[in-house]
Image (spheres, rainbow, N blue to C red):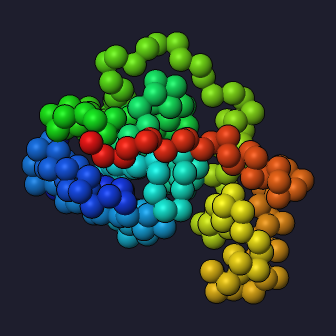
Amino acid sequence: MQLAQKIIIADDHPLFRAALKQAVTQAVPGVEIVEADSLEAVQAAVENNPDADLVLLDLHMPGTNGFTGLVFLRGKNPGIPVVVVSGSEESSVMKRALDYGASGFIPKSSPLDVIAEAITTVLEGEEWLPEEVAEGVVDVTEEDQKFATNLASLTPQQFRVLTMLTEGLLNKQIAYDLNVSEATIKAHVTAILRKLGVHSRTQAVIAAQRLCVDPPKTEMN
């Protein structure tokens, strides 16, 4: 295994980031760790560290809900493997994560030695899922896969606007929050609809919500 590997840990819970750091250090001696607490921070971390060997990504952080962040990150940075680390531990969620481009899925309830094993496995070029995950879980539909591909074509700012649309914000509210003009937001929305292949904001929101995952009732044990 190469020396001085670099791993980005993306989770908005400081305590769980600390636990992940411990597992990463155990799995990869001498590793360089970069931390992020939102999707925007992950994007910046990847841009500033294009030589990163792995991203450990929570499904539920500011700026993303479910697979949208994973799809967007993989689309913009296909050379960096991503492992989802989440409290959403249903087999179907784990399988869909791999279908959307993740190299592995680590339940947050996993002990540190299992997390370390998963990280090592993915760094060696293999996929990792918990042993108990059943085979033959329903695959992602062709329609959802097409939408995921279209979603990955958005620019970072367009993705941010789409996320805010799914939160029910109006153009004027989005413009205020992003400190741009309402006309700029209207232009972004037009581009988003074209890239996603939909005809209205409502259709865009409904399509994006198919990639969402209900947050676990308790993120940490």
- Residue toward you, 43 or 182: 182
Q: Residue at x 72, y 29 (%)?
A: 142
Total numbered badges shown on the rendered structure: 0
Residue 106 location, quadrant: top left
**Along the horizontal axis of the image, is 140 left or right of 124?**
right
Query: Split into 4 quadrants, where in the image is the C terminus?
Result: top left
In the depicted structure, whether residue 57 falls above or below residue 172 = above
In the depicted structure, whether residue 156 falls above or below residue 195 = below
In the depicted structure, whether residue 27 falls above or below residue 8 = above
Percent position of residue 215, x then y: 49, 44
In this orientation, does residue 120 appear? no
Query: Split into 4 quadrants, where in the image is the N terminus?
Result: top left
Percent position of residue 188, x then y: 76, 70
**Along the horizontal axis of the image, is 121 left or right of 152?**
left
Q: Residue at x 37, y 60 (%)?
A: 12
Q: Residue at x 71, y 68 (%)?
A: 169
**Along the horizontal axis of the image, is 49 left or right of 176?**
left
Percent position of residue 171, x then y: 77, 75
In this orientation, does residue 36 appear? yes
Percent position of residue 116, x then y: 19, 38
**Along the horizontal axis of the image, is 111 left or right of 96?**
left
Q: Residue at x 82, y 58 (%)?
A: 201
